[in-house]
Image (cartoon, rainbow, N blue to C red):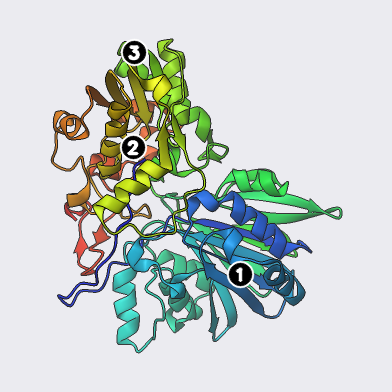
Amino acid sequence: MDRTIQLRVLPTDGTRPAQPKEKCGIFGIWGDPDAARTAYLALFALQHRGQESAGIAVSNGEDLEGHLGMGLVRDVFSASDLNRLARFGSAGAIGHNRYSTAGGSLICNTQPLIERTGDGPVAVAHNGNLVNAEALRRLFAERGHLFHTTSDTEVMIHLLASPDQRETPDPLAASMRRLQGAFSVVFLFPDRIEAARDPWGWRPLVLGELERDGRLCPVVVSETVALDVIGARFVREVEPGEIVTLSDAGVESRQFAEPADHLAMCIFEHVYFASPASTVFGQNVLGAREEMGRTLAREAPVDADWVMPMPDSGRSAANGYAHESGIPYREAIVPNRYVGRTFIKPTQGEREAAVRLKLNIVREIVEGKRLIVVDDSIVRGTTTRLKMLQLREAGAREIHLRISAPPIRHPCHFGVDFACKEQLIANGKSVEEIRAFLGVDSLHFLSLEGLLGVARHDPQAYCTGCFSGEYRVDVEHPQTGEIRSKEQARMF
Ligand code: SF4
C-alpha cells in the first residue's frame, strides 16, 4: 500500500478540523496478576494497527491509573513505567495503539482516555470512527460540557456521564445505542471491563482466555494474533451489538442492540489492515490474501519472468498469484527495516528520497526481466509511481502491476484514513489513465466480485464503501458536521 504523510492545515473558514479517524488496536484483560505487562505484550502484537501513540490503564479495584505517550509501544513504555503500573494494581488492564491523521496527532488524543464521572473513574479505548460524533459533541457543548480532546471517543464518556443515560437501568447499553458508525471499544472501571462492538460489526473484536496460576483470565482484543503472543486461547468473536463484561465473576454477555440487518464488516481488514497471522471475521488473513492473489491471476493473466511482491503488503497476494500462474516468485524490492515513520517529509523531493531509502531494488534480479508486481492497494499513487520508476531505472523490461483490491474511489468514514476523495488516484480516473500515470505496461485491479468471492461470509455482510461508494449508514461531514445520506456520503 502506498502511503505519504500528510500535513494538515487548520481550516480558516470557521469549520472544525476533521476529527481524526482512528484505526487502532485495543486490548483488555481481567484478573491477571501481571495485567500491565500482558497488556504491553499485546500492544506489541497490535502495533500494525497504530503507530502514533500507545497507552495502558490499570485498575487496583478502586481506582485507575495510566501511562500514555506518543510513538511506538517500545518508545512509550520503559521498565519503570510498567513497574509503576504493576505496583498501582493488577485487577485489570486495558491498552490502546492509535493511528490517526496528522491533524489528530495530539498528545491529548492518546488513549485510553481516563476520566472521572459522577459514578467514578472510567478509561476507554476505541477502534473505529463514529459518524455522529460531531452532532453529539455539539449537543453536549450546548449544555456546557467541556472537551479536552478532538477525538470522537470522548463523546462516549460524555454520554455515559450524562443524566439521560445514567438514569436508565443500563447506562452503558443506553450510551452505545446513541452511537452511529464503527466502534469496537473497551471500558475499564475499577471493578470490571466492559467491551462493546457496534451492531454492524465494522471492526473486529474477539474474546479469549489466559490461564494464570490455574485461573482463567478473560481477554478481549482486536485481533487473534495478540492472543497467540500472550499465550491465550481464542474463545469467540464479540457479536455485533453485544456487550461483554469481564470481571471476577468471569464473562457475562448482553445485547445492547440487535445486529444490523446488513452487517458491515470492513473488507479492507482482509486486504491490508489486519495482521496476516490473525483470524479476522472467522477467516485467516494470510489465507484470504493468497486467495486474492490466485483470483487476480485468473482475472488478469500475463506472461512474465517473475512474480514480485511490493513488500510487505503485497507478499501474500503475490504468493497466491505465483502459485496460480506457475510463474516463479522472486523478491527484488528490499525494505530497509531501519527507516522509521517518525520524520516528516514535507516536500516532494524529501518524500521521494524517503521512498528510495525505504525500498531498495536488486538490479541483478530485475534487469532485462518482465515483472508482475503485486501490491494490495493504491491510495494516492505517488509512492507507487516512484517505485515503478525505480524498477525501470534498474532495467526492468516490462512491468505488469497487479493490485489485489479494487480501485479505492471513495473515502472511508469508519476508521481507515484514506485521503479525501480528490487525493485518491482512482477518483474520476479510468484504469488506463491510472496505468499511464504510474508508467507501467499493464495494470489490473482485482474486481469487487473477485474480492468478495474470497471472503467467507455472504457478500452483503461486508462494508465495501471505499470501493463501491455504497455505505450502510448516513454519515456526517467530517468538518461541518452536516448529515449526508449514505447515498451522498460518497461525495465527501
Ligand atoms: S469504507 Fe473501506 S476501509 Fe472503510 S470500513 Fe468500509 S471497507 Fe473498510
Horizontal placement of 134 versus 196: left or right? left
Q: CA distance from mark 3 to mark 2?
A: 21 Å
Which numbered disc covers residue 377? 2
What residue is pinned by disc 1?
188
The earlier-in-sequence mark between 1 and 3 is: 1
Task: Tell me the mark number nearer the camera, choosing from 1 and 3.
Answer: 3
Q: Judging from the image, what secondary structure is the residue with disc 1 in?
A: strand
Foreground of the two, 340 or 44: 340
Q: Camera-side residue: 390 or 106?
A: 390
Amino acid type assigned to the residue bearing label 1 in the image: Leu
Circle 2 SS class = loop
In the image, residue 408 lies at what x, y percent? 26, 41
167 shown above or below 316:
below
Does residue 208 appear left or right of residue 318 in this picture? right
Q: Which residue is mark 3?
A: 304
| Circle 3 crowding by C-alpha within 10 Å: few under 14, some 14–19, many from 20 | some
What residue is shown at x 28% (from left), y 18% (from top)? 397
Q: Amino acid at mark 3?
A: Ala
Residue 492: x, y in percent?
Answer: 19, 56
Q: Is residue 93 left or right of residue 32?
A: left
